[in-house]
Every structure is written in structure tokens, then in C-alpha cells.
Image (tube, helix red, strand yellow):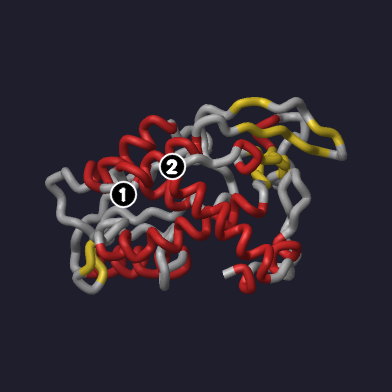
């Protein structure tokens, strides 16, 4: 997997880039294998892997530069943590696919293969046009979860991971991974003091989309409790499409 790591990506606070690992040689790979095996065996993530640098990115569109809401914080985590996230996610994917997660029929654009926001928009528009052509009324309700990543509660996330079927040793790993996370903000060459993080998931984290899906996938079940007929596209229920994550 190390050979396939991308180039020219910003490193974390430790300044270890993907290239350092990618071209580090097999001796380095052996040490990393031992490190990751022990992390999983003892369900203990070293504190140095749980610290991130938050870079505020200006949202543009003439937003006031002196307001916090005009910026989006992107977290740069250590490269060794990113590789660990990728390893865990790769192991999870077959299990998630076998258990149909995210569950059908909701059309979740984020974190799904062979689907994107363009496909999602096309299907919704065609489904609406078809319903109107048949003389049906179409009712819509839009929900914008502001700062969706920032408001995620870790305790709720851990409960949903357990309910999903991720239990025991793997659940303990996720619990320890989240607990004790720290960060500092860096901008214009200046760094803030280090602070504890007790909620939210990282913008740019490899596991963040998965966490997002775990937290919000069941919102569709509440949407479908009404008495109206679902919006369909080629007999596929797309009454609660989600574009985000």
C-alpha cells in the first residue's frame, strides 16, 4: 500500500510527508507493520498520531475576513495516522458492503462508488419531471445541516458504531482513537496553543466520511415515515437523496 501513496500532499505537524514513507524502503515498511499490528492488538493509538494542525481556509464569495464563519478549518494529521486510517477503512469496506451499509434505498452521494452529485442531481430532476408529467404533485423539503462535521458528538458516534455491529476490539480502537485528540491552529506562520478536542470529526480525514455516514444515515428512515408515495427513478426509491459528507 505504501507504494501507492500520493505525492505533493501537505504533511502534519511532524513534517513527515507521504514521500518519506513511500520511498523509505522495506526496512521502514517492516517497522510500520509492527507499529500498526501493535496498535490494533492493544487498541492503543499513540498520542502523537492524534494531534492535528488546523488550517483556516477562506471561503471566499466576498465573506467578511474578520468573521470565524468565513473560514473552513482543514485538519492536517500525521502521515502515519493517515496510513492507519486507510488500513482500517480498507479492512472495513468488504464488511460494510456485505452488510449493505449505507443501507438502501436512500441515495447517499458521499462515500459511495459510481455515484456523484452530478448523477444525483440528474436522477432527482428526471424523477420530478416524470412525476409532474404523470399529473402528480411533488412535495419537497430541504435540510441543510450546518457544519455537519463540527457538531458530531463522539458518544453518539460510538453508540451508532456499536449498533452498526462494530463491537469489542475494533470498537475499543475507535474509542481510543477519538479520545484525547488534540490540535492547534496555524495561520500566517503563527501557531496557537494546543487544545483538546471533545467533539467533531476532521475535515480531510480519511475516516471522516465513514463517521459522517454512521451518524446521519438513519435520518432517511424518519423521512420515509410519511403517508406520501416515494419519489422514484426507474423503480428506485430516491425520495431522500443526500449530497454531502
Q: Residue at x 22, y 46 (%)?
A: 221
Mark 2 residue element: helix
Q: Residue at x 57, y 70 (%)?
A: 1
Marker disc for residue 206: none
Q: Position of residue 16 (x, y in %)?
A: 75, 54
Q: Which residue is mark 1?
A: 140
Labels 2, 1: front one: 2
The image shows residue 147, relative to residue 203, as above or below, that is above
Q: Position of residue 148 (x, y in %)?
A: 48, 40
Q: Which residue is mark 2?
A: 174
Q: Position of residue 195 (x, y in %)?
A: 66, 26
Circles 2 and 1: CB distance less than 8 Å? Answer: no
104 relative to 56 in the view: left or right: left
211 relative to 200 in the view: left or right: left
The image shows residue 220, relative to residue 105, as above or below, that is above
Q: Residue at x 69, y 39 (%)?
A: 54
Location of residue 169 (image quadrant): top left
149 relative to 114 in the view: left or right: right
Q: Residue at x 34, y 66 (%)?
A: 94
39 relative to 194 in the view: left or right: left
Q: Earlier in the sequence, mark 2 or mark 1?
A: 1
Mark 1 residue element: loop
Mark 2 burial class by Cα count in 10 Å: few <14, some 14-19, many 20+: some
Who is closer to the viewer here, 21 or 85? 21
Q: Position of residue 150 (x, y in %)?
A: 53, 35
Amino acid at each position: 500500500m505504501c507504494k501507492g501513496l500520493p505525492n505533493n500532499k501537505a504533511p502534519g505537524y511532524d513534517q513527515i510527508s507521504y514521500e518519506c514513507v513511500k520511498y523509505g524502503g522495506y526496512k521502514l515498511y517492516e517497522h510500520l507493520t509492527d507499529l500498526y499490528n501493535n496498535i490494533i492488538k492493544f487498541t492503543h493509538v499513540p498520542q502523537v498520531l492524534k494531534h492535528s494542525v488546523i488550517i483556516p481556509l477562506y471561503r471566499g464569495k466576498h465573506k467578511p475576513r474578520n468573521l470565524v464563519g468565513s473560514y473552513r478549518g482543514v485538519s492536517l494529521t500525521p502521515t502515519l495516522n493517515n496510513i492507519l486510517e486507510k488500513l482500517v477503512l480498507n479492512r472495513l469496506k468488504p464488511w460494510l458492503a456485505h452488510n449493505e451499509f449505507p443501507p438502501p434505498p436512500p441515495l447517499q452521494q458521499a462515500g459511495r462508488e459510481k455515484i456523484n452529485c452530478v448523477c444525483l442531481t440528474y436522477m432527482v430532476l428526471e424523477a420530478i419531471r416524470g412525476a409532474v408529467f404523470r399529473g402528480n404533485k411533488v412535495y419537497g423539503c430541504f435540510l441543510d445541516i450546518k457544519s455537519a462535521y463540527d457538531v458530531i458528538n463522539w458518544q453518539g458516534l460510538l453508540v451508532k458504531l456499536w449498533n452498526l455491529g462494530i463491537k469489542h476490539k475494533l470498537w475499543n480502537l475507535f474509542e481510543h482513537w477519538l479520545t484525547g485528540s488534540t490540535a492547534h491552529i496555524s495561520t500566517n506562520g503563527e501557531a496557537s496553543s494546543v487544545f483538546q478536542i471533545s467533539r467533531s470529526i476532521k475535515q480531510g480525514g480519511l475516516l471522516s466520511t465513514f463517521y459522517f455516514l454512521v451518524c446521519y444515515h438513519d435520518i432517511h428512515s424518519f423521512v420515509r415515515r410519511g403517508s406520501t408515495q416515494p419519489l422514484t427513478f426507474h423503480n428506485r426509491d430516491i425520495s431522500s437523496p443526500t449530497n454531502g459528507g
